[in-house]
Image (cartoon, helix red, strand yellow):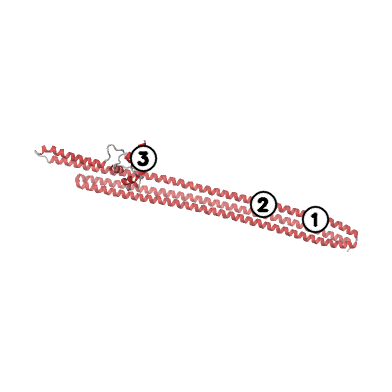
């Protein structure tokens, strides 16, 4: 083989090595671009998964909100239905009581006209029975009202506990999802950094091997050329120096491109990670605002429902108290009528007895007898009137105050409390003893004292 062919073979080999290095660099660039595309695809998939998860959480919160609204509406309907049933039962019971009292009153009126003594005994027994029945009805009504209020409070407490539990579970789920996303992002970044570091090390090893091989080939070629011809050695040395400079330039360019690509990829990955963190922070803040808004809406709905229920219960309690006062007034009026009828029957009986007992000698005695019995009849009528209306002539109408009915006014008058000034000065404990437990279960005597003070103040 001649020197020219050997030189051509060496030049062809150098060109082939250069082409292989260029191909290797292109392959590395293609691998880097593919890795970058895979990283972007993974990030897009992770963002889509997070968006899907956030949409599912939002749908779940909307479902829970609708379920809470449905349960609230059902609870309100149940409370309204139960209240209507209780009101209807009370109205029916009161109507039956009025009918029964009217029937007994008619029967007692007939019995009174026939037999005075039996009428008085029957009246006393019926009055006692009515008082006992009314006391029992008041106690039963207070028990039913207390049970109803307890059930309402228990239902409200259970609803509040369920809402707090759901909010805590949602908050924990959000924290767990955020931590998992951050952990997966950090692991992905670490894997990418390790892979890039391995690729760079492999590139450095390949370049060092190629440089070492090139140095060995150059030394061998230099020895052969130096032995054959000095001029060819100079030419070859010049060519080799040129090729070495070119290889060094290509290597420097390759390193610069690799560093630039690595810096750009690192900046892009860092930018994408910052965007992902900012997006996650915005989503977490939005979810926190939604949870806070949901909590505020639930609290406002709960407060509104509580106010409506409290207003409704207060109105129903006032209406029921008014009905009870009206019924007590009717009973008191009925008893007063019975007492008036008994007094009239006694006066008529005395007049008939005086007329039937007359003779010629009794005519002169009729006037003194009538004169003696008239004070007794007046005293009986006065006593009856005193039972019906024990108010003093200069007393105040205590019945005008809210919560004081005819029976309560009668007890206050009997206790010596006939004016607003006396009522304003009495203590609540003494006033409770005078009014009795049947009244204090439905009314607050402190309100009576305050109303009396307001009347005195103008």
Residue on which the image places disc 3:
451
1 or 3: mark nearer the eye: 3
Q: Looking at the rendering, in which quadrant would you find the C terminus?
A: top left
Labelled disc at residue 270: 2
Of the residues under marks 1 and 2, which one precedes in the sequence? Answer: 1
Instruction: Please tell me which residue is depicted at 45% across the width and 53% down the height of the picture.
Output: 158
Residue 89 point in image, percent of width and height: 35, 49
Residue 318 point in image, percent of width and height: 37, 44
Of the residues under marks 3 and 2, which one precedes in the sequence? Answer: 2
**Label 1, label 3: how far apart the Cα atoms are:** 108 Å
Q: Tell me, yes or no, whether the two marked residues, 3 and 2, touch with CB atoms within 8 Å.
A: no
Residue 401 point in image, percent of width and height: 34, 40
Give the residue at the far bottom of this rendering. Answer: 1
Is label 3 in a helix, a strand or a loop? helix
Give the residue at the far top of this rendering. Answer: 458
Disc 2 crowd, CA 10 A, few/some/many (<14, 14-19, 20+): few
């Amino acid at each position: 083989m001649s020197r020219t062919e050997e030189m051509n073979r060496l030049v062809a080999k150098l060109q082939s090595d250069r082409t292989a290095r260029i191909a290797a660099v292109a392959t590395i660039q293609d691998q880097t671009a593919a890795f970058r595309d895979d990283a972007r695809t993974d990030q897009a998939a992770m963002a889509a998964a997070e968006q899907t998860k956030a949409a599912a959480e939002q749908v779940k919160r909307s479902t829970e909100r609708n379920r809470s609204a449905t349960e609230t509406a059902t609870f309100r309907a149940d409370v309204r239905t139960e209240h209507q049933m209780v009101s209807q039962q009370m109205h029916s019971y009161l109507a039956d009581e009025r009918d029964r009292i009217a029937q007994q009153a008619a029967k007692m009126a007939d019995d009174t006209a026939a037999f005075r003594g039996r009428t008085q005994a029957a009246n006393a027994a019926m009055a006692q029975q009515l008082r006992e029945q009314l006391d029992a009805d008041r106690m039963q009504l207070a028990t039913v009202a207390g049970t109803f209020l307890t059930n309402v409070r228990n239902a409200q407490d259970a609803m509040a506990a369920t809402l707090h539990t759901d909010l805590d579970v949602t908050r924990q789920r959000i924290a767990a999802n955020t931590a998992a996303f951050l952990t997966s992002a950090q692991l992905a970044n670490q894997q990418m950094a390790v892979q890039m570091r391995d690729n760079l090390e492999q590139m450095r090893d390949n370049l060092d091997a190629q440089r070492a091989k090139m140095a060995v080939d150059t030394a061998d070629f230099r020895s052969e050329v130096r032995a054959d011809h000095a001029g060819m050695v100079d030419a070859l040395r010049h060519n080799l120096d040129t090729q070495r400079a070119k290889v060094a330039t290509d290597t420097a360019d390759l390193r610069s491109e690799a560093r630039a690509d690595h810096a750009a990829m690192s900046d892009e990955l860092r930018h994408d990670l910052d965007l992902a963190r900012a997006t996650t922070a915005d989503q977490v803040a939005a979810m926190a605002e939604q949870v806070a808004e949901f909590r505020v809406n639930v609290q406002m709905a709960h407060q509104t429902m509580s106010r409506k229920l409290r207003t409704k219960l207060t109105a129903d309690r006032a209406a029921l108290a008014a009905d009870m006062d009206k019924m007590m007034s009717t009973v008191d009026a009925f008893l007063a009528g019975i007492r008036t009828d008994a007094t009239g029957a006694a006066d008529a009986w005395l007049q008939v007895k005086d007329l039937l007992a007359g003779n010629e000698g009794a005519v002169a005695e009729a006037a003194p007898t009538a004169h003696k019995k008239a004070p007794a009849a007046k005293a009986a009528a006065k006593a009856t009137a005193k039972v019906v209306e024990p108010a003093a002539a200069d007393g105040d109408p205590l019945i005008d105050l809210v919560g004081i009915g005819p029976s309560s006014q009668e007890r206050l008058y009997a206790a010596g409390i006939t004016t607003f000034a006396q009522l304003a000065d009495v203590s609540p404990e003494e006033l409770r003893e005078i009014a009795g437990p049947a009244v204090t279960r439905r009314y607050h005597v402190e309100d009576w004292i305050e109303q009396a003070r307001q009347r005195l103040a103008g």
